[in-house]
Image (cartoon, rainbow, N blue to C red):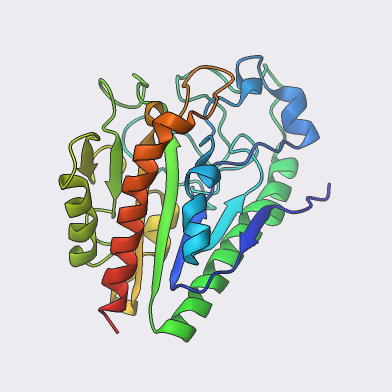
Amino acid sequence: MTIRDPFHFQTGSLPLLISIPHAGTQLTPAVEAGLTPDARALPDTDWHIPQLYDFARDLGASILVGNYSRFVIDLNRPADDKPLYSTATTGLYPDVLFNGEPSFLPGQAPDDQERAGYLQQIWQPYHQQLQDELARLKAQHGYALLFDAHSIASVIPRLFDGKLPDLNLGTNDGASCAVALSDRLVSCCERQQQFSHVLNGRFKGGYITRAYGKPAENQHAVQLELAQVNYMSEQYPFAFDAARAAPLQQLLSRMIDSMIDWGAQQR
């Protein structure tokens, strides 16, 4: 098995890297053959996130996007697959959907050898590129900002009670970035009334935020989990809704601008 193009990367001019690990929809033959009918629709994908953050490309942010579905391998989980949350979650090789239903037909999940190839040829290259770009940004600018961009259906009873807030900021309970930076982002959310928000609620940041957020080393990481209801249909075929997305993109743009402005003041 040979994996080609595990990610798409665009180098920018700003000290900011936007990581998008869960927007990929490519499948390997083994995964595609084994998925249940429900899983074949790829319901747990972070749909349209690259499109939602298109404005950041024009600003000059570096963009890293995983090409393969999380049903192949989850780029936001540790390589040793240790759980990140004490509540219900999915692992490095998700065998269940977010709703708790199985991802694979009985006995049809890829075997350990196949999955070891995914780790070597998809997970490791993505994280190597992420590390290399953060090192480049720090060498060039003296610091690096990492924004890990995600989305999820607004109602998933297995994962959280009720309806998820619209914007869910995660900083690993303050360990992945300077408090002043997260305060800036929260302030952006507080200056509007259309979208609800929370800091370090149900989603405190996955592996990427926790592994690469090192504020003592001038490397600051923030995760944002968006409720998909605000920019797309949450039902198949999960269509993008430009009219609904526009005000959300305006808020995201203000948040990214605020992050960049904060970083510039640290030099």
- In the rendered image, the quadrant that contains the C terminus is bottom left
Q: Position of residue 196 (x, y in %)?
A: 22, 35
Residue under the image location 61 percent in, 42 percent down: 73
- Furthest residue toward right: 1
Q: Position of residue 76 (x, y in %)?
A: 49, 48
Q: Position of residue 191 (x, y in %)?
A: 16, 47
- Up/down of 238 relative to 195, above or below: above
Label count reads 0
From the viewer's side, name the closer residue of 173 and 17: 17
Q: Residue at x 59, y 69 (%)?
A: 11
Which residue is found at the position 54% from the left and 33% from the top? 45
Compared with 261, 114 (above or below) is above
At x 74%, y 28%, the residue is 32
* Residue 7, picture quadrant: bottom right
Specify whether 90 is left or right of 155: right
Q: Nearer the viewer, residue 164 or 260?
A: 260
Going by the image, does 226 lie left or right of 266?
A: right
Where is residue 13? Give x, y as percent: 51, 74
The residue nearer to you, when weighing 93 against 213, is 213
Residue 21 makes an appearance in the image: yes
Q: Kindly tell me whether residue 176 is visible in this rendering.
A: no
Q: Is residue 243 above or below residue 62?
A: above
Q: In the displayed structure, would residue 179 be above or below residue 247?
A: below
Residue 4 appears left or right of 45: right
Q: Kindly indicate the quadrant of the structure image that contains residue 194.
A: top left
Q: Nearer the viewer, residue 28 or 120?
A: 28
